[in-house]
Image (cartoon, rainbow, N blue to C red):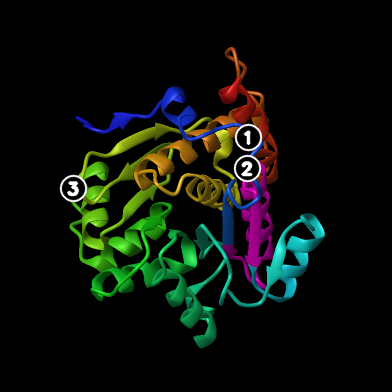
Amino acid sequence: MSEAREWSRGDTARFLRVPGPDDDKYSRGVVGLRTGSSAYPGAAVLGVEAAWRAGAGFVRYIGEGRAADAVLARRPETVVSPHAVGARVGAWVIGSGTDAASRTVEEEHELRQILAGEGAVVVDAGALDLAADVATASATRAPMLLTPHGREFARLQERLGVDEDADRESVATAVAEAVGAVVLLKGARTLIARPDGPAVAVEAGTGWLSTAGTGDVLGGVLGALLAANPEADIADIAAAGAWLHGQAARRAAGVHDGAPGHPIVALDVAHALPGVIAELLA
């Protein structure tokens, strides 16, 4: 039987606030994204859009080519630059829409610099291998939140040598312990495992959420919440982000009062975020 605590609406509301007269774009949270690629430029757009829609005060995108062009075309408010050196960032999102097999030496060096920094880092997709390497190298590193889906998690398990025969919750916790970081294992029942505490569970808002690009949206949401709550427990932020993501999907798909809803695309989820946040703040 699962021992994971179920995350709630009230739990999530603790990490949201209305900006006050003394706030500026920096105090609301600065998110940096090094995501997307020429092969998958949409991942960059989705993460950036979600970070803005989830309340970030400032969003930086690090990248070039098709991905950078797509980000500026969609969200001209975003500050775009080719390199992360010297960027003022409260929380990072890396790896979404990238492939470790096609990563250049320069890209890897920059990602490792981010992982060796002080700000929290959401590590997704094509950067998960680096998170595992950094964790086992006993080097100074940033606080990390790993966000694998099922197949990525299985590869991470194998890389870390974690037993595959235990139940899902136990395995997630074992991976969190092995990597020394919070692990958000995506699924119909998302699990957030800590390396040193009980797991938390978040029920998916709707099955309509299982469509391409929604994981990129989740990355942007998590980055915005981490940047806005620098002192908060990362596992709690992970759960709050997963809850917001699921509720935005329900809102976008029209799932309510027994209505089964309808198909959505990932941008629909990002667009629904402000409405869900408004309801929590009311």
Mark sitting earlier along the chain (1/3) = 1
Q: Label 1 crowding class (10 Å Cα cut-off): few <14, some 14-19, many 20+?
A: few
Identify the residue under disc 3.
Answer: 166
Marks 1/3: CA distance?
47 Å
Location of residue 67 (image quadrant): bottom right
Q: Residue at x 29, y 30 (%)?
A: 5
Q: Label 3 crowding class (10 Å Cα cut-off): few <14, some 14-19, many 20+?
A: few
Q: Position of residue 138 (x, y in %)?
A: 23, 73
Q: Residue at x 60, y 33 (%)?
A: 248
Please name the amino acid that badge 2 sits on.
Answer: Asp
Q: Position of residue 187 (x, y in %)?
A: 42, 42
Q: Quadrant of the N terminus?
A: top left
Circle 2: element type: loop
Label drawn at residue 44: none
Identify the residue under disc 2.
Answer: 23
Instruction: Specify whether 123 is left or right of 23.
Output: left
Identify the residue under disc 1.
Answer: 20
The residue lying toward the viewer, choosing from 242 and 249, is 242
User: Residue 123: within the magenta?
Assistant: no
The residues colored magenta run 33-61
Please name the amino acid that badge 1 sits on.
Answer: Gly
In the rendered image of this protein, does residue 2 appear above or below residue 79? above
